[in-house]
Amino acid sequence: MTTDPQTALTAALDRMWVQFLPQIEERVDVLAAAAQAFAVRQLSAEQQQAAQAAAHKLAGALGTFGLASGTALARELEVMYSQEGGPDPASGEQLASLAAELHTIVASRK
């Protein structure tokens, strides 16, 4: 029995998803923790850099797995965390909301 190329590709992506899911979830957790720290004005420079890096990596990875909406959210977070001095002080709620949306998107792919 021969498998068509689309089915083979989907199966390969599903295997890769399972393999990389722990890293993806960890990056979403980094973003959630950074949003929490930011909300209580405790975001360190290291946390900000980690959040920017996690968002950058998620933006690329989520698109690979067909999660374009997750890529868009991750890019938005990347831009917010890349600002010198950190995200806009008024954006605390938005940071938490975007991280929560990313968590939902990742969970829905399982």
Image (cartoon, rainbow, N blue to C red):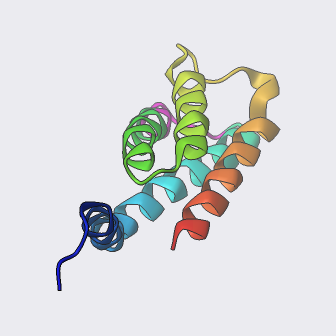
Would you say 26 lies left or right of 31 here? left
Find the magenta span and give its range. 42-48
Magenta stretch holds residue 47: yes
Quarter where residue 22 is shown? bottom left
Magenta stretch holds residue 90: no
Q: Nearer the viewer, residue 91 or 19?
A: 19
Residue 40 visible (yes or no): no
**Residue at coordinates 57% horizontally, 16% vertically from top-left?**
85
Q: Position of residue 101 (x, y in %)?
A: 69, 52
Would you say 86 lies left or right of 14 here? right
Q: Position of residue 80 (x, y in %)?
A: 60, 24
| Residue 86 in the image: above or below residue 56 | above
Would you say 3 lies left or right of 13 here? left
Quarter where residue 43 is shown? top right
Q: Nearer the viewer, residue 100 or 49?
A: 100
| Residue 24 in the image: above or below residue 108 | above
